[in-house]
Amino acid sequence: MSAVDHTTSEQHGTSAPEGPDTPEVVFRTLGVTKVYDTGEVQVHALAGVDLTLFSGELTVLLGPSGSGKSTLLNILGGLDHVTNGRVWFGDTELTDLSDRGLTRYRRDHVGFVFQFYNLVPSLTARENVQLVTDIAPDPMPAHEALELVGLGHRMDHFPSEMSGGEQQRVAIARAIAKRPRILLCDEPTGALDSSTGVQVLEALRQINERFGTTTVVITHNAEIQRMAHRVIFFQDGQISETRVNETRIAPSEIVW
């Protein structure tokens, strides 16, 4: 069967699963717009996004470049502000928070993983992870985070001594070491080949399943949607479709 055969489709991002085991809502947005004013032109990055994301789910965001995926991720992560609309994290309205409040929210609740690893080259893997554990309120030990992503044997190596996939897994370890409730990933496999990309996706899957970390992944590889609980399609700054996968595949089964 194709991926479509294993999914149910919803036309609105706010559709919620039904039943007695309905998961907790982690994020909710209402009418979110984002306009970047360059002085000469206005770029409408988001054009009225209504979205609900649920606790413990791994969600994949798909859509062409410029469709608004990264803008939305930055807003959910407290890195950017909406132009209009409202955003909630649980019962907390992010759009009401000051810059200091958003900084506290990012520190306490959100882990970020980007396409480029942003590791400090003069620090070992362990020391890169400790950059987060030194400021987090309830961190796990750096070596434990590295062991979770299969790098316990590489914790005293420098980034230059590691492959791209290993460096990305260090970045994931750094993101999860503070025990975030949310893990936001923007093209985490974009710079990797298939074998190392699968290793990174496996690390994300394991963290999602072991800790129940709500995980959102932006990707241009449409096959990755098949490992997600929920897939959200973006087009021209809006959500065009949402699918819920009834059957999910393992990262090792993804065709690159």
Image: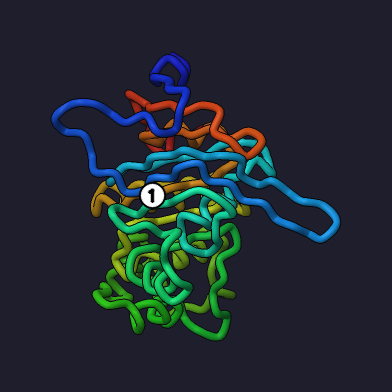
Question: Residue 150's quadrant in the figure?
Answer: bottom left
Q: Residue at x 43, y 20 (%)?
A: 9
Question: Residue 51's quadrant in the figure?
Answer: top left
Query: For the residue marked with disc 1, what is the amino acid?
Result: Thr
Q: Taking 17 as reference, is 199 left or right? A: right
Q: Taking 219 as reference, is 230 left or right? A: left
Secondary structure type for disc 1: strand
Q: Residue at x 65, y 40 (%)?
A: 67
Image position of 223 with respect to 86: above or below: above
Q: Position of residue 22 (x, y in %)?
A: 21, 34
Image position of 193 with respect to 240: above or below: below
Q: Residue at x 45, y 59 (%)?
A: 95
10 Å neighbourhood of mark 1: few (<14), some, or many (≥20)?
many
Nearest the eye: 116 or 255? 116
Nearest the eye: 28 or 223? 28
Q: Taking 25 as reference, is 44 left or right? A: right
Q: Residue at x 46, y 55 (%)?
A: 76
Question: Residue 17's quadrant in the figure?
Answer: top left
Q: Taking 131 as reference, is 61 left or right? A: right
If the image is split into quadrants, where does the N terminus sit? Answer: top left
Image position of 253 with respect to 10: above or below: below
Q: Position of residue 152 (x, y in %)?
A: 34, 69
Q: Position of residue 44 (x, y in %)?
A: 69, 46
Residue that protrudes farthest toward the left in the picture:
20
If the image is split into quadrants, where does the C terminus sit? Answer: top right
Residue that protrudes farthest toward the right in the picture:
40
User: Mark 1 highlights which residue?
Assistant: 215
